[in-house]
């Protein structure tokens, strides 16, 4: 198996671990925060053990382990989010994910996102986009269930947009890939592990992915904070970037 096949297997294996844990939550007395914490630990333990076995010389950047910065001296770094969407997971929803990405020599070389709730794994080498052709209107944008970014107010005032609330970042990006929505805009703060694998999948399917100012997304940085993200159909890139820029300008001058 190569790196991509391992990324898929790792994401799927962690997802299966999480599904088994959640299925037994009642008999184990796990709910709410206890279930979130147990899920984080179980998926982290699984991925950590498998990566040590398969790639003992590679570095790892994970939401659930200490970042020692030793990874900066490596040319291969696995960027993982063992459980993206702990809230949705603990609420027995389907819109959560597992992220596994490989950064190699300055770029995302492979990535896989498992969506265990819908029994699907998407990867960065899919032969063709899963999405259908763009319809006439409205533009469907995936947003947070609880805190849509303020910049969307400008977009909704000027464009025909339908906001589609859903759970984790990985699930939202995959919703663009799958054709459920046309774009995902985030501006509320994220880290590299929130977007690395989903961005690899999106890029592999021909979608546009960047910062909301159009700049490239950079990974394995000294500070892994990567606060904003735009993933969209390529034909919407210029339209959305222009209106986001106008919205950010109006917010800063208000």
Image: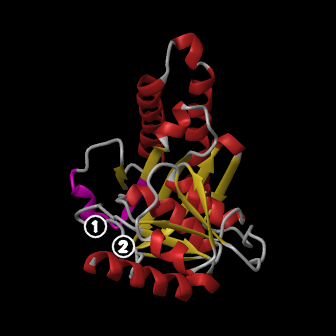
Which quadrant, please, contains the C terminus? bottom left
Helix, strand or loop at label 1? It is loop
Query: Dot 1: few (<14), some (14–19), or many (≥20) neighbours within 10 Å?
Result: few
Q: Residue at x 77, y 77 (%)?
A: 133
Q: Is residue 205 magenta?
A: no
- For residue 161, above or below residue 24: below
| Label at residue 221 | 1
User: Percent position (x, y) of residue 103?
Assistant: 42, 66
In the rendered image, which quarter is residue 194 located in? bottom left
The span from disc 2 to disc 1 (Cα, nearest Å) is 7 Å
Q: Residue at x 54, y 55 (%)?
A: 170
Q: Is residue 2 visible?
A: no
User: Percent position (x, y) of residue 177?
Assistant: 66, 66
In-front residue for pair 55/101: 101
Mark 2, residue position? 218
Q: Is residue 62 visible?
A: yes
Which quadrant, please, contains the N terminus? bottom right
Q: Is residue 110 left or right of residue 129?
A: left
Q: Is residue 143 left or right of residue 194?
A: right
Q: Residue at x 39, y 49 (%)?
A: 56
User: Percent position (x, y) of residue 107?
Assistant: 42, 74
Q: Is residue 74 magenta?
A: yes
Q: Is residue 108 left or right of residue 202?
A: left
In-front residue for pair 58/237: 237
Disc tally is 2
Query: Dot 2: few (<14), some (14–19), or many (≥20) neighbours within 10 Å?
Result: some
Whether label 2 touches label 1, CB < 8 Å: yes
Residue range highlighted in magenta: 68-79
Helix, strand or loop at label 2? It is loop
Q: Residue at x 52, y 31 (%)?
A: 90
- For residue 177, above or below residue 66: below
């Amino acid at each position: 198996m190569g790196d991509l096949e391992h990324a898929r297997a790792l994401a799927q294996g962690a997802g299966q671990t999480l599904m088994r844990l959640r299925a037994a939550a009642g008999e184990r007395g796990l709910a709410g925060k206890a279930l979130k914490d147990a899920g984080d630990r179980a998926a982290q333990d699984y991925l950590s053990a498998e990566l040590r076995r398969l790639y003992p010389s590679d570095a790892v950047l994970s939401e659930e382990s200490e970042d020692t910065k030793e990874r900066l001296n490596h040319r291969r770094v696995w960027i993982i989010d063992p459980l993206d969407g702990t809230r949705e997971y603990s609420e027995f929803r389907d819109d959560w994910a597992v992220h596994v990405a490989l950064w190699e020599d300055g770029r995302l070389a492979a990535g896989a996102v498992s969506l265990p709730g819908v029994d699907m794994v998407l990867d960065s080498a899919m032969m063709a986009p899963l999405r259908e052709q763009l319809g006439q209107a409205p533009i469907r944008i995936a947003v947070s269930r609880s805190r849509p970014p303020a910049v969307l107010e400008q977009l909704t005032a000027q464009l025909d947009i339908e906001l589609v609330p859903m759970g984790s970042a990985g699930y939202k990006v995959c919703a663009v890939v799958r054709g459920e929505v046309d774009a995902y805009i985030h501006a509320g703060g994220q880290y590299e592990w929130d977007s690395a694998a989903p961005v690899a999948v999106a890029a592999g399917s021909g979608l546009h992915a960047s910062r909301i100012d159009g700049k490239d997304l950079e990974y394995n940085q000294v500070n892994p904070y990567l606060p904003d993200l735009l993933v969209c159909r390529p034909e919407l890139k210029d339209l959305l970037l222009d209106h986001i820029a106008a919205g950010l300008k109006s917010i800063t001058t208000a």
